[in-house]
Amino acid sequence: MTDAVQPVATWRKVLAAILDFVMVFFGGGYAIGYLTGNVTSEGFKLEGLPALILLTLLIVYFVAGSKYLGGTIWQRILYKH
């Protein structure tokens, strides 16, 4: 007997994308800010090359996670049935 695979609910896809973005933006932003000396008392402030590195990190995270690793962290958590 085969089990029919049900599609993932739209709200789960949207929530996974939001949580992934927030996690990588703040985690990666703080890490890059710390490594480049751009951490302030209010958080981090990235301009120029560090900001470009963060943007690249976001793109690589979503592409690699979705295409090569079987899903991003939050996709794997929220797509379970």
Image (cartoon, rainbow, N blue to C red):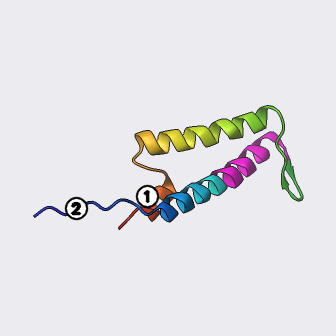
Q: Which quadrant holds the C terminus?
A: bottom left
Which residue is at a point 63% across and 40% down the rendered structure image?
A: 57
Q: How would you rate the neighbour count of disc 2 (Cα within 10 Å): few for under 14, some for 14-19, many for 20 or more? A: few
Q: Which mark is residue 76?
A: 1
Q: Looking at the image, which residue sits at the far left?
A: 1
Label 2 to label 1: alpha-carbon separation: 19 Å
Which residue is at a point 49% across and 63% down the rendered structure image?
A: 12
Asked if the stretch drawn in magenta spans residue 32, the answer is yes
Which residue is at a point 84% across and 43% down the rendered structure image?
A: 37
Does residue 43 appear left or right of residue 56 in this picture?
right
Q: Which mark is residue 4?
A: 2
Instruction: Residue 62: give x, y in percent of width and height.
Output: 54, 44
Instruction: Residue 10: give x, y in percent of width and height.
Output: 48, 61
Residues drawn in magenta: 24-38
Which is nearer the eye, 58 or 12? 12
Find numbered disc 1 in the image and state the secondary structure of the residue it sits on: helix
Whether 25 is drawn above or below 77: the answer is: above
Name the main secondary structure of what is drawn in magenta.
Answer: helix
Q: Looking at the image, which residue sits at the far bottom?
A: 81
Q: How would you rate the neighbour count of disc 1 (Cα within 10 Å): few for under 14, some for 14-19, many for 20 or more? A: few
Count of numbered marks: 2
Which residue is at a point 73% across and 48% down the rendered structure image?
A: 29
Q: Which quadrant holds the N terminus?
A: bottom left
Find numbered disc 2 in the image and state the secondary structure of the residue it sits on: loop
Q: Which image quarter: residue 9?
A: bottom left
